[in-house]
Amino acid sequence: MSFGDTQHLRVLIANERRDRLALVAAIVAALGHEVIAREIDVDEVGPVTARERPDVALVGLGESSQHALHLIERIVQQAFCPVILLIHEANPGFVREASRRGIFSYITDGESVDEASDWQSSIDIVLRRFAEYHDLRGAFGRRATIERAKGILMERHTVGDDAAFDMLRDRSRAANRKLVDIATAVVDGHALLPKQAPEPAD
């Protein structure tokens, strides 16, 4: 699923209450999405998430707030997808705890399909935010890798910051590869190099 395509999503739903699972499954189906897993057990939700790789996960607050928080934690650990909390009424304290465990948003769930007409808009917004978040993380990761590679080249070749970057850029152009790929190769290869360059032989 591309983040721009939210017409048919593969959705995991989790709640300790089976009746709420059934209600949420009906709403998800009415929105045109597929429920790929319904989970109650905390120990099972992680492996199921890893195996099924949902596009989005909906976790409901049942009888126990701790149970819901544990479900969120296990899903976040295993999923490359946003987790949305479903609550029946405003509960700022619980939402705050859930956000610390990795939810991207929450929806106040209705008691019928008709009352959940705004769910799709909420899901669309969450998926866009999730995509932006991962794009930003990727950009920071790429920048960090390039900076590490520059540091290695500066040390190895006794050159300045600009010269080290020029070396990466020139290699990138010559090899017709992305700059971050060249930087990654430098960083990965650095672990195999000796601590200091060998002294030239007389």
Image (tube, grey):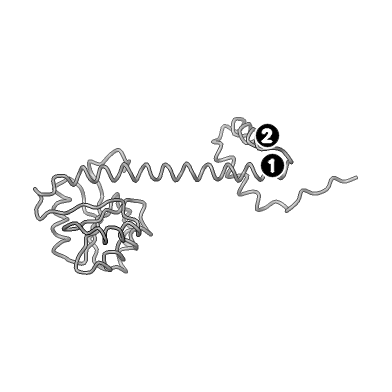
Q: Nearer the viewer, residue 35 or 85?
A: 85
Residue 97 found in image quarter: bottom left
Identify whether 143 is placed above or below 35: above
Label 2 sits on residue = 163
Extreme residue in the right direction = 202
> Could you say which disc has been placed on residue 100 in the image?
none
Given contact means CB atoms under 8 Å apart, are the residues at marks 2 and 1 in contact? Answer: yes
Q: Is residue 37 visible?
A: no
Q: Quadrant of the N terminus?
A: top left
- Identify which residue is drawn at 21% across, 50% down: 34
Q: Earlier in the sequence, mark 2 or mark 1?
A: 1
Q: Position of residue 177 (x, y in %)?
A: 56, 35
Identify whether 198 is placed above or below 39: above
Cα distance in 3D space between marks 2 and 1: 8 Å
Label 2 sits on a secondary structure element that is helix
Q: Position of residue 154 (x, y in %)?
A: 69, 42
Label 1 sits on residue = 154
